[in-house]
Image (cartoon, rainbow, N blue to C red):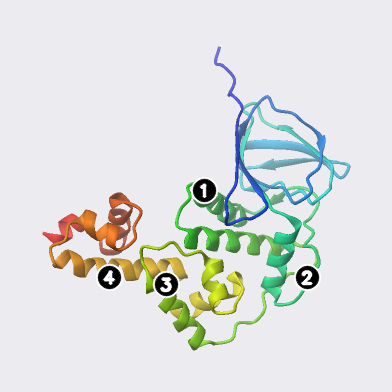
Amino acid sequence: MAKPPQDKARFWRSPLLPDAELLTAQYYAQEFAPHWHDGFAIPVIQTGAQSYRYRGAKCIAGVGSIAAINPGEIHTGERATDDGWTYRAFYPSVAWMQALASDITGQRMDIPWLPDGSIHDTEVAAKLGLAHRLLEAQADALQAEAALTEGFALLLSRYARNRVQAQALHPDAVRVARMQALLVEDMTAPLALSTLAAAVGLSPFYAARLFSRTVGMPPHAWRNQVRLSRAQGLLRQGLSVTEVAAAQGFTDQSHFTRHFKRAFGVAPGRWQM
């Protein structure tokens, strides 16, 4: 007889989501007693399904669902399938969620209240899941914060009860040029989206949208393309793949090789031959 899955859970934090916890968990035997959170609970179901009682109703959240819980609301949690469930959960503060809603709309917003019950939206779940994985892996801060902002902005714009509609974008070549200059100023230095946006007087959400709309790709992708273009020149000069990867700020040689091959169809060592 096969042993039942073992419960595994890890709480952790990221500086890109201040005053918050994150959870990566696999649960089988766990049964959560009625409890609440001071902030939001945003679990994204990865496998299996979770059953929980929330606001007087029994809810089921399966793969591709977000079992969103608003601040202060009592809820439970247990498996809804024989194999249990796995999820990636965010616990953002009320202040962070309200600030994001205000950044999206361009005006002061009330706390963005989410619907009762499970939200089944595979696109939102996928974007939030990607952001969670990038944060957990301590990936490029620019990419991770952009993914975090994009995922939560999509969640709020689609499901917040108080309408969270993105403000109109206005062309701003000066700010975009300034962001480009900052992105290439030091390729080896990590750069968060919030730092880049603050330098040009914009919110992270608006800055990322403005840059992507104007340039045709998000800031982290544009920065990586510049890195790769410069890397080609260094490879032509005879520098080793390891030297070029370090000079252009890639975390390691395999990271550089992966991006180079995706862009040019061949590994840098073979391109150099």
Q: Is residue 172 left or right of residue 68?
A: left
Instruction: Identify residue type, mark 4.
Output: Ser
| Residue 109 numbered tag | 2
Location of residue 116 in the rendering, given as x and y in whole percent from the top left corner: 81, 51
Which quarter of the figure has residue 265? bottom left
Q: Earlier in the sequence, mark 4 or mark 2?
A: 2
Whether the residues at callouts 2 and 1 have beta carbons within 8 Å, the answer is no
Cα distance in 3D space between marks 2 and 1: 29 Å
Q: Earlier in the sequence, mark 3 or mark 2?
A: 2
Decide if residue 267 is in sight here.
no
| Residue 229 numbered tag | 4
In the image, residue 168 sits, relative to residue 8, either above or below, namely: below
Instruction: Identify residue type, mark 1.
Output: Arg
**Residue highlighted by disc 1:** 133
Which quarter of the figure has residue 194? bottom right
Instruction: Identify residue type, mark 2.
Output: Met
Q: Residue at x 46, y 53 (%)?
A: 139
At mark 3, the secondary structure is: helix
Q: Earlier in the sequence, mark 3 or mark 4?
A: 3
Location of residue 18 in the rendering, given as x and y in whole percent from the top left corner: 64, 55
Q: Nearer the viewer, mark 3 or mark 2?
A: 3
Q: Residue at x 48, y 63 (%)?
A: 142
Q: Residues within 10 Å of mark 3 (few under 14, many from 20)?
A: many
Q: Is residue 266 left or right of residue 224?
A: left
Q: Residue at x 59, y 79 (%)?
A: 201
Q: Nearer the viewer, mark 3 or mark 1?
A: 3
Q: Is residue 122 left or right of residue 224?
A: right
**Residue highlighted by disc 3:** 183
At mark 4, the secondary structure is: helix
